[in-house]
Image: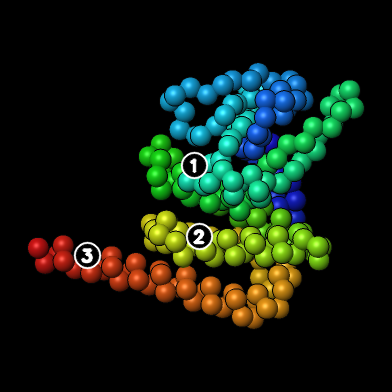
Amino acid sequence: MALGGATDNALYQTDDVDIVLSSQDEMKAFQVYFHGRLILPGIDHATPEIGRIEVGSPHPLSIDILAAPFGLKREHVQKRAVVMYLETSDGERVGARLIHPAHALIGLVENYLHLPAKRDQWTLDRLQGLFPVVRRYTIETSRDSDHRKAARWVAQTLYRFCSSRDGVKFHSDTGIDLLGAIPGPDEADLGAMFRNREEPKLQQHVARKRRGRQRLLQATQSRTQQD
């Protein structure tokens, strides 16, 4: 699936699309739309999927149907899923709930940290490829005053995750800063109260957590050298 418009001159492609569906009817409708083959998961699947649709042409595509990505709560993912409507050849509209870009980003981090098979450069490349997608989604959402709260939620969620144990560890291990996916004040209107009062406190909290881990690592390294 191609995610166009992430930047003016970029097109991001993936052969692994994660979709949130909750009923057999939705799964079957999506299968029909893509002329694919529905596969139910086996016990050895690392991704907590409830099904998978394999599409053979024109380009091979694997569509994971998830209750929630690894490391995320189902109710949170379902609540924030983004609805995309597709029209079938007979004129019917099929509603597919795509995982919110921010949740997709966090899910990849959890994959990298906790699933050995996902702890590789490919996962990091996919993750960083989502940065401009999250940014553009947040920017576009913030332009509608009725959805500005949803845009602000993206920033709040990424700040909270970056201050969490996993978020701090990921930054320490990889040097990748998820906060880079948050658009700046000149790009997205997230509200004056957030930018002037809440965001500085969130930034300080993340920085404090990261400094704490760095001190811990330095102390551990020092003890190891002494031993």
Q: Residue at x 66, y 50 (%)?
A: 80
Q: Give x and y (percent) for residue 86.
A: 81, 34
- Answer with the quarter of the image where residue 98 lies: top right
Q: Give x and y (percent) for residue 191.
A: 72, 74
Q: Residue furthest left?
A: 227
Task: Using the image, determine if residue 107 lies above or below residue 148.
Answer: above
User: Which corner quadrant holds the C terminus?
Assistant: bottom left
Q: Amino acid at mark 1?
A: Phe
Which one is in front in this view, the residue at disc 3 or the one at disc 1?
Answer: 1
Secondary structure under the numbered disc 1 in the rendered image: loop
Of the two numbered discs 2 and 3 on the same chain, state the one appearing first in sequence: 2
Circles 2 and 3, Cβ within 8 Å, touching? The answer is no
Q: Amino acid at mark 2?
A: Phe
Which of the numbered marks, if any, corresponds to residue 220?
A: 3
Which of the numbered marks, if any, corresponds to residue 41?
A: none
Cα–Cα span, label 2 and label 1: 15 Å
- Answer with the quarter of the image where residue 66 lies: top right
Q: Residue at x 59, y 20 (%)?
A: 39
Q: Residues within 10 Å of mark 2 (few under 14, many from 20)?
A: some
Secondary structure under the numbered disc 3 in the rendered image: helix
* Residue 124 seen in render: no
Circles 3 and 1, Cβ within 8 Å, touching? The answer is no
Q: Give x and y (percent) for residue 198.
A: 60, 76
Residue that badge 2 annotates? 161
Cα–Cα span, label 3 and label 1: 30 Å
Q: Residue at x 84, y 32 (%)?
A: 93
Q: Residue at x 53, y 46 (%)?
A: 73
Q: Residue furthest right?
A: 91
Which one is in front in this view, the residue at disc 2 or the one at disc 3?
Answer: 2
Residue that badge 1 annotates? 70
